[in-house]
Amino acid sequence: MKDFTILISSLVCTIGCSQVSTIHFNSEWNEKNNFDISVLKDCEKSNVVICHNPELKDKHEILSVPTIIIFDNNVEVKRFESKYNDET
């Protein structure tokens, strides 16, 4: 998990001084895979519980949780998703 935090932090830093935001999508049943985005610096941060915000889940096409999306000036620049297996 520490390596993942470093990866996201470095990506946010390389984007620069523009308006960077990070949204972490998760669910109440998936708390053991929660990621603390509060450690990220120099960006807006939001946590979204998909069962309470289905419109955001649909808008951002969230297929699995956790999913973390990084935006630069409201444009998605990177997405980190847990593996989704549609055969289950």
Image (cartoon, grey):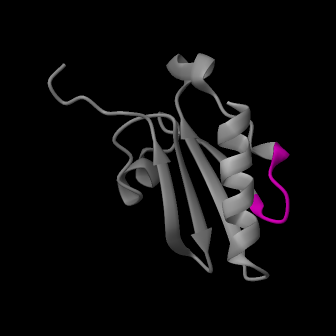
Query: Residue at coordinates 36% horizontally, 33% vertically from top-left?
Result: 83
Q: Position of residue 5 (x, y in %)?
A: 72, 42
Query: Residue at coordinates 66% horizontally, 62% vertically from top-left?
Result: 11
Q: Does 41 lie within the magenta span?
A: yes
Q: Is residue 82 left or right of residue 32?
A: left
- Vertical order, 51 against 68 (above or below): above
What secondary structure predominates along the stretch shown in magenta? loop
Q: Position of residue 47 (x, y in %)?
A: 66, 44
Quadrant (top left/top right/bottom left/bottom right) for the N terminus = top right
Which stretch is magenta? 39-44
Query: Residue at coordinates 39% horizontally, 46% vertically from top-left?
Result: 62
- Vertical order, 41 against 86 (above or below): below
Residue 58 seen in render: yes
Q: Considering depth in this image, is 71 or 61 the residue closer to the camera?
A: 71
The residue most toward the front is 3
Q: Does 42 lie within the magenta span?
A: yes
Q: Position of residue 34 (x, y in %)?
A: 63, 28
